[in-house]
Image (cartoon, helix red, strand yellow):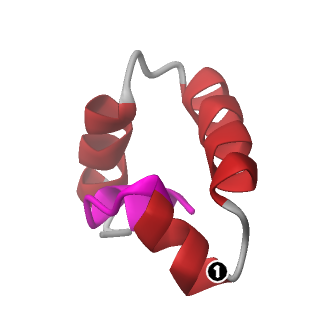
């Protein structure tokens, strides 16, 4: 999922790629942001990109 954030994908796009519901993606996304200490998806995406994931 962090790689998907690094690609700038929306919740709907991530859900389609991973065969999950948008609600599941949103829940996981919130937990990813918390664990990474990121304020928003943009910050997480930049972090993923800098780590070579996106």
- The correct choice, above or below, for 14 with respect to 40 in the image is below
| Residue at image point 63% right, 38% down | 32
Q: Residue at x 30, y 69 (%)?
A: 54
- Residue at the (25%, 53%) spot, across then down: 50
43 relative to 5, above or below = above
Q: Quadrant of residue 7?
A: bottom left
Q: Residues within 10 Å of mark 1 (few under 14, many from 20)?
A: few
Horizontal and vertical percent position of residue 9: 33, 63
Magenta span includes 8: yes
x and y percent of residue 46 in the render? 24, 44
**Going by the image, does 14 lie left or right of 40?**
right
**Span shown in magenta:** 1-11
Q: How many discs mark residues in the rendered view? A: 1
Q: Relative to residue 34, is residue 41 drawn left or right? A: left
Asked whether residue 3 appears in the rendered view, the answer is no
Per the image, label 1 sits on a secondary structure element best described as helix
Where residue 47 appears, as percent x and y from the top left, is 33, 43
Corner quadrant of residue 40 = top left
Can you see residue 8? Answer: yes
Give the camera-side residue of 13 and 39: 13
Q: Is residue 39 magenta?
A: no
Q: Quadrant of the N terminus?
A: bottom right
Give 11 or 33, whichever is nearer the viewer.
Answer: 11
Horizontally, residue 45 falls left or right of residue 1, namely left
Residue 31 sits above or below residue 20 on the image = above
In the image, what residue occupies the spot 38% across and 69% down? 53
Height in image: 11 above or below 47?
below
- Between residue 48 and residue 7, name the one nearer to us: 7
Residue at the disc numbered 1: 18
């Amino acid at each position: 999922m962090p790689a998907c954030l690094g690609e700038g994908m929306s919740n709907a796009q991530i859900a389609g790629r991973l065969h999950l519901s948008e609600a599941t993606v949103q829940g996981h996304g919130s937990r990813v942001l918390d664990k990474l200490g990121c304020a928003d998806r943009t910050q997480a995406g930049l972090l993923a990109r800098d780590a070579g994931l996106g």
